[in-house]
Image (cartoon, rainbow, N blue to C red):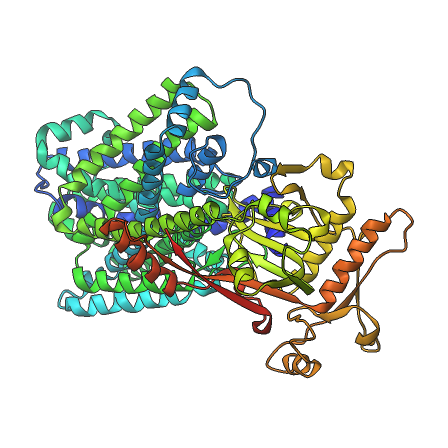
Amino acid sequence: MDIESASYKDQYCKTSWKVVLTLAYQSFGVVYGDLSTSPLYVYKSTFFGSKVRLSDSDAEILGVLSFIFWTFTLIPILKYVFIVLRADDNGEGGTFALYSLLCRHAKIGLLPNQQPVDEELSTYSLEQRPPMRQGSQIIKTFLESHQRLRTGLLVVVLLGTCMVIGDGVLTPTISVLSAVSGLRVKASDLHEHYVVLLACVILIGLFALQHYGTHKVGFMFAPIVIAWLFCISSIGVYNIFRWNPGVFRALSPYYLYKYLKKTQIDGWISLGGVLLCITGAEAMYADLGHFSQCSIKLAFTCAVYPCLIIAYMGQAAFLSRHPADIERSFYMSIPKPVFWPVFLVATLAAVVGSQAVISATFSIIKQSQSLGCFPRVKILHTSNHIYGQIYIPEINWILMVLCLAITIGFRDTIMIGNAYGLAVITVMLVTTFLMFLVMVIVWEKNVLIALAFLLFFGSIECLYISASLTKVHEGGWVPLVLSIIFMAVMYIWHYGFRKKYEFDLQNKVSMKWLLTLGPSLGIVRVPGIGLIYTDLVTGVPPIFSHFVTNLPAFHQILVFVCVKHVPVPYVPLGERCLIGRIGPKEFRMFRCIIRYGYKDVQKDDHDFENQLVMKIGEFIQTEGTDVLASSNEFTVDGRMAVIGVPTQRGIKIVSLTKDDSPDNSLSLPLSYSKSPTMQSFQDIEELESPPFVQRKKVRFEIPDSPDIDPSVRDELAELIEAKEAGVAYILGHSYVKAKRNSSLLKKIVIDVAYNFLRNNCRVPTVALSIPHLSLIEVGMIYCV
C-alpha cells in the first residue's frame, strides 16, 4: 500500500534553512530556466511581430522597456510570489491544486465516489471557522446548485491544463532555436537548415535526459542557470553604462502612456511580444510540489528578478544606439571578447529553460489522471528523497515529437513566439479566475477584495490576450489546436468514466435482496478469499451478480476492493485504508477502500494480500469497540473504519525459514496464491523459478490471549484458513457502449473516442501486480 510515498512527504515537510537553500539552488535549474532565457527573444518578437519600428528618439524602446518592467513586476512578483504561491494544497501547486482546494470547500467536484469520511483525512485541512460571509456563501451556493456551472468550471481547469501542456511543447522549441540562431551572428553564411538541425539534436538530447528525474537534472542544470544570470546581468550593466544610462527613465509608468499614444494600435499589437518576458512565471506555482514556497521566493526575489531586469535594461540601452540590430539584439549586444563563452552558456541555458515546463507537464498530467481526467499512463517516481518528482515516458516522447515537428515546420522564432505567448497568458488568466474563487470560498475574503484582484490582474492579462489573438493566423493557432485536442481527450475520458460509474451505481445489487438469500447468498461458498475490484464505495457492484448468475459459486470470504482518489495531494499511510463489513457477520463479506491523493504514486505491491488479511483481522478484532465507534462511517453496508498500520493484536504474521515445513503451517507465496484444487504444488515451484523472483513465505497466527472473544477467534481462524486456501482476484473486463436511443454525438464519443482511449491506454494499476493464475476477468457490457 505504498509505504515509501508517504515517507517522501514527511521528509519534504521537515524543512530547515539548509534544506531551503538546497531547494532554492535546485530551483534555478528546474523552475527558472524558462523565465531566465526570455531575453533571447523578447525584443525581437516585440518589434518584428508588429509594425512598430525604432526611431531616432528613445520613445519606442523606452516604452517597451517600461512595459517589460511593470509586467515583470506586477505578474511574477505581486501576483505569484505574494499571492498565488500562498494558495498551496498541502505544499502542491498548479491548476489542479486550486481546483482541489475548491472541491474540498464546496460541493463542486465531479468525482463520483467521494464520501463524508474523506473529510476526516488530516490532509483535508477543513478548519473550524466562523460562519462564511454572506457574499461568499451566495457564490458558493450558486456554484453548488448549478450542474452546468460545475461542468464549466471543470472545462476552465482543463483549458488551463492543456495550455500548460502546450507550454511544454513550445518552450523547448523557442528557447533552443533562439539560442542556436546566435551562430549566424559570427557565421552569417551558415544556412538555416543547419541551425534547425542543431536545434533538433539538442532537443532530442534534452528529452532523453528526462528519465534521470528532476532531482538529478536540477543539480546538474542549476550551475548553468546561475552562470547564465551572472552573464546577462553583467552584460546588462556594461551596456547600460556604455550606451545609455538614461534607460532608467523607463521605470516611470509615464512611458507606458507615451508609447501607446505614439504607436496606437500597432503598439497594442506589439504587446504580444512583450508578454514573452513572463514566460515561465506559472512554472513557479506549477512546480511548487517539487520544492517549497520559501525556496522559490528566495531564489526569485534575490537573484532571478534583479538579474533579468538589468538584462532587459542593458539590451534597451544597446538598441537605443543600434536600432538596426534588433533581429539579433541579444547576441549583438555581447562584447566581442566574451561572445563564444556567452553563446555556449546561452545554449545550455536554453536547454535548461525547457526543463521547467517539462517537469510541470509531468506533474499536471499525473494530477489529471488521478482526478479521472486523463487516460492511464505509466508514472515513475524518480527520487527517494524529494516527494512529487516523477517521469512519464509516454508524455515525454509525445512532447519530443511535437517539439521537433514545430521546430522543423516553423523554423522561425517569431511565429513560435506568437503561439507561445497565447498559451502562456491563457494559463495565467485561468489561474487568476480560480484564485478569485479560492479567495472567496477557501480563504473567505471579502468579495470586493477578491473582485479587485480579479479585475486588476484579469484586465492586464486580457489586454495581452487580445494582442495575442491578432496573431492566430501567424502561429497562434498552434496552442489552440493542441489545447482542443488534449481537452477533447481529457473531457471524453472523464465523461466516459462518470457514465460507467453511474451505470454501476444504478445497477448495484440491492442489500435487501442479499439479506433474503441468507449467509450462503444462494450459491456454493468454496474455500478461499475472493477480491472483487470495483469503483463503487457503497453497495455490491453488478459484476458480482453477473458472475454468480452464470457461475453460482464463490469464495467463503468476499472482499470488495475499491482503489480511489480523493481531492487532496497525498493521503498518509495510516489513513489510507478503510475496512468495513457488508451485511451480517455470517455473510463474511467485507469492503476495503484504498485512498490515494492526486500526487500519490501507486506502486506494485506484492505483499498486498498479507497486508489486507492483517487489516481485516484488525478490523474484526476492533469491531464494536470504542476505537471503531469513534472513527467510522455509517452506511447502508455497515460500519467503515480507518485501519492504519496493523498492530498484530488480532493476527500475527511470521516469516518462515527454510527449515519450516509448509505442510505444518498456514503459509503460501505472497504474490501468487490459488486454491489447491486449481493449482498443484509443482505449479508453485515453477512460478518460483526464474525469471520470477522468489517470494518469502509467511504464516499467520492468532495470539493466545484470553481477551479475544471466542466468536472473534473463530472468525479470525476462518480468515486464516481462507488465506491458506488461496486468493483470487476478480476484475471486470467491461465493454462500454452508448444506448440505442442515444444521440449521434454521444455514440461517437462513447463508441468510438472513449473506447479507442480505453483500448490504447495502460491497464488498471491494480492489475499490474496480480499473478496471472489468480486473475479472473468477468466480461460485462455497459450500456450508458
What is the tally of numbered marks visible in this picture? 0
At a point 45% along the width and 48% down the height, the residue shown is 501
Where does the image place residue 290, in percent across and percent down from the top left? 49, 49
Where does the image place residue 709, in percent across and percent down from the top left? 86, 47
Q: Report which quarter residue 723 is drawn in.
A: bottom right
Where does the image place residue 618, in percent across and percent down from the top left? 75, 50
Vertical comparison of 339 with 436: above or below: below
Foreground residue among 268 and 583: 583
Asked whether, in this view, residue 427 is left or right of residue 517, the answer is left
Residue 689 in view of the camera: yes
Q: Residue furthest top?
A: 134
Residue 325 in view of the camera: no
Q: Residue furthest right?
A: 706
Foreground residue among 70 and 1: 1
Where does the image place residue 71, in percent across and percent down from the top left? 28, 34
At a point 59% along the width and 24% down the height, the residue shown is 128
Q: Report which quarter residue 719 is drawn in.
A: bottom right
Asked whether, in this view, residue 290 is left or right of residue 496, the answer is right
At a point 18% along the width and 36% down the height, the residue shown is 466
At a point 24% along the width and 26% down the height, the residue shown is 253
Vertical comparison of 404 with 253: above or below: below
Foreground residue among 637 and 727: 637
Asked whether, in this view, residue 610 is left or right of residue 737, the answer is right
Q: Quadrant of the N terminus?
A: bottom right
